[in-house]
Image (spheres, rainbow, N blue to C red):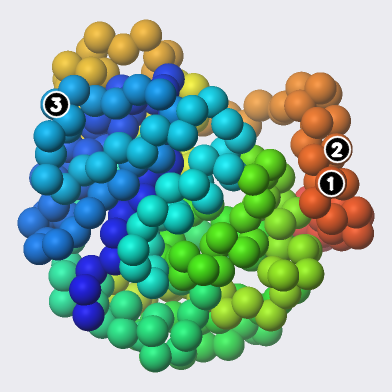
Amino acid sequence: MSIPAILINTCDTYLDVLEIQLELLEKHGYFDQSGLKVYVNTETKTLEKYSDHETVIFHKNGFKAWGERVRSSLKIIDSTYVLCLFDDYFPETNFDKNAYFDLLNAVSLKNMDCCYLAPLLKRKDKDSRSDYGLFRINDLRPYRLNSMAAVWSITTLLTVLKDHDDPWSWEAFGGYRPEARNLKIWSVSEASPFQYVYSFQSGGAVYRGGWAQSVLDRLGLMSHPIIMSSERPVHKTLESTSRSIVWKIKFLAKGFSISKSGVFKFIFSSIKAKYFG
């Protein structure tokens, strides 16, 4: 089995974050794999140091909606599956090729549409279990569609992701689309031999536009030249801050354009989770 391509989703204002991401992927052995291609979905800018790189391929999609840019990049990747990352999903452990190929064999054998590579979603009683520390997420779970590190079937992702989607509304409401029902969505557990280890609890190394100090400290990046010269704030704590009312209105409006019934189901599940656990 050939190793799937990696797709990193970024934008022009996050090229500083992307540069560290690429350095860490190379440091941890991802670039050592024969035939691996790393596609970078960006807007208009690239990194000069990777302009002639044999592994890294920049795909400039212009200032379009996130969904449209991701879909455009997916269409140029010639493989069945792709490992999707955001630019601040900094890897924290070395790449284990054998464990990864074992996971890919399980993905292929069970014809999975997606397999999340971090144990963010915990297994519940209604989730089926399999060998290799994997479990299938039942169709009623909120956030079944998620932008965390994952191996996706390119065909499936092109089907469930639409041009006008953004990451927040897609995660919250995309799973209620008719085409998203009955998908074979799986996840690693804490016992899985292969995991893409990164700071998924904080959503990555960047939080609300600033660096997450806990991540930088853990990876020894506080003295990195990019961090030292960065204009981004460094968040010592990641206290949850409420979104503005304007953001919430736009979020729900986007939700109604995706799935009207999904908005009501999302609100109900959010209230249930907040007050009843």
Measuring 76% from the left and 22% from the top, which residue is drawn there?
Answer: 244
Instruction: Give the residue type at disc 2.
Output: Ala
Q: Which residue is mark 3?
A: 49
Q: Residues within 10 Å of mark 2 (few under 14, many from 20)?
A: some
Considering the image in quadrants, where does the N terminus appear?
bottom left
Considering the image in quadrants, where does the C terminus appear?
bottom right
Measuring 43% from the left and 61% from the top, which residue is drawn there?
Answer: 150
- When asked about the image quadrant of residue 74, the answer is bottom left
Q: Are marks 1 and 3 in contact (CB under 8 Å)?
A: no
Instruction: Give the residue type at disc 3.
Output: Lys
- When asked about the image quadrant of residue 161, the answer is bottom right
The mark closer to the camera, 2 or 1, is 1
Rendered location of residue 58, percent (x, y): 30, 37
- Name the mark on residue 257: 1
Side (left or right) of 90 relative to 68:
left
- Name the mark on residue 271: none
Question: Does 17 sit above or below residue 132?
Answer: above
Q: CA distance from mark 3 to mark 2?
A: 41 Å
Q: CA distance from mark 2 to mark 1?
A: 7 Å
